Image (cartoon, grey):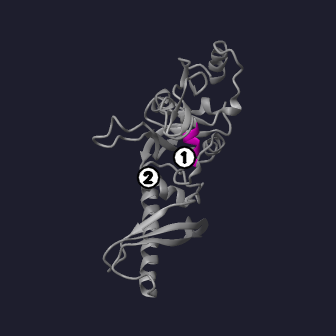
């Protein structure tokens, strides 16, 4: 078990903001229950651990393969993330913004660009008929070529991990993750860029509002679920050779945006539902 924080470090000023320059990481080795690990950890700390300050839980790839059910039972409303790197390595990354890595991760989930899963959400999915879970995947942002020494390390969301019965079965990229979020009605914000058919250039539409409904039906004795998605958007950039005042051009743009969303959803369903055999969409 690994716990990170910014108590006890030295404070320094960075770009007009004061932040702690050291992250403390405490480890508890072995496969003992979380409660036992915390008891051992408390023996080494002079102050009582206050878990209400905890804002996120990170599962490294090794634990994702072994199973996450045990540790999940201890935590409640914290945000949950999956990662390839050991959790201790990510906890020690000091981002240019935010006082700690935990604070940065919590704020990333609130932007609406990626998944926001709490322990409560994960437990509910594990107890569903499908026993499938999806977790946001975090990693260190890659360095810009030639600027590795100047660039400070930071964290980023990059797709998601798919679990069945609390063990990882695969990873999906950002586009497929967005497709899953469309079906789950969790898309809050975003920009869709398309190339209208028969028109040179690209146009970008900012998402203002969206809603997805799952409508079940029975056809020929078989259950089917229709995914009905509605969205409102605003054209924020027109890099085409046409003006958007024309109804015909606007109609073409609407059709292409609709097709882009539909393709994103279909790719996600084929990858996750059919190939991984994991129902993270809430169909069951």
Camera-nearest residue between 92 and 187: 92
Q: State left or right for residue 275 relative to residue 182.
A: left
Q: Residues within 10 Å of mark 2 (few under 14, many from 20)?
A: some
Instruction: In the displayed orientation, state which residue is furthest to the top.
Output: 43
Q: Please tell me which residue is depicted at 68% across the width and 37% down the height of the picture.
A: 76
Taking 44 as reference, is 85 above or below it? below
Which numbered marker is on residue 174?
2
The quadrant of the rendering that contains the C terminus is bottom right
Measured as percent of width and height from the top left, residue 211 is found at 60, 66
Residue range highlighted in magenta? 103-109
Provide the residue designation for mark 1: 108
Total numbered badges shown on the rendered structure: 2
Q: State left or right for residue 102 relative to residue 248.
A: right
Q: Is residue 120 magenta?
A: no
Measured as percent of width and height from the top left, residue 271 is found at 42, 53
Give how far apart the Cα atoms at labels 2 and 1 are. Answer: 14 Å
Camera-nearest residue between 138 and 172: 138
Q: Please tell me which residue is depicted at 59% across the width and 33% down the height of the picture.
A: 69
Please tell me whether mark 1 sits on a helix, a strand or a loop.
helix
Q: Please tell me which residue is depicted at 30% across the width and 77% down the height of the picture.
A: 200
Q: Is residue 226 visible?
A: no
């Amino acid at each position: 078990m690994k716990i990170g924080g910014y108590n006890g470090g030295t404070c320094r000023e960075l770009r007009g903001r004061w932040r702690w320059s050291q992250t403390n990481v405490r480890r508890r080795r072995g496969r003992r229950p979380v409660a036992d690990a915390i008891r051992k950890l408390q023996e080494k700390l002079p102050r009582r651990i206050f878990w209400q300050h905890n804002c996120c839980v990170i599962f490294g790839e090794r634990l994702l393969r072994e199973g996450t059910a045990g540790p999940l039972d201890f935590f409640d409303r914290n945000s949950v993330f999956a990662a390839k790197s050991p959790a201790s390595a990510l906890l020690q990354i000091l981002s240019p913004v935010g006082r700690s890595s935990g604070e940065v991760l919590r704020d990333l989930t609130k932007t609406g660009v990626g998944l926001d899963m709490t322990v409560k959400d994960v437990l509910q999915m594990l107890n569903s008929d499908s026993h499938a879970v999806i977790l946001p995947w975090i990693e260190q942002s890659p360095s810009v070529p030639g600027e590795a020494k100047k660039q400070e390390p930071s964290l980023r969301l990059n797709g998601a991990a798919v679990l069945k019965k609390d063990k990882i079965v695969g990873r999906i990229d950002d586009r497929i993750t967005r497709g899953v979020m469309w079906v789950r009605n969790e898309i809050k914000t975003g920009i869709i860029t398309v190339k209208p058919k028969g028109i040179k250039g690209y146009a970008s539409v900012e998402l203002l509002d969206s809603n997805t409904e799952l409508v079940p039906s029975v056809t020929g004795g078989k259950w089917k679920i229709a995914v009905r998605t509605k969205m409102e958007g605003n054209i924020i950039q027109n890099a085409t050779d046409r003006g958007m005042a024309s109804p015909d051009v606007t109609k073409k743009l609407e059709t292409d945006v609709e097709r882009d969303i539909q393709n994103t959803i279909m790719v996600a369903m084929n990858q996750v539902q059919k190939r991984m055999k994991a129902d993270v969409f809430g169909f069951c």
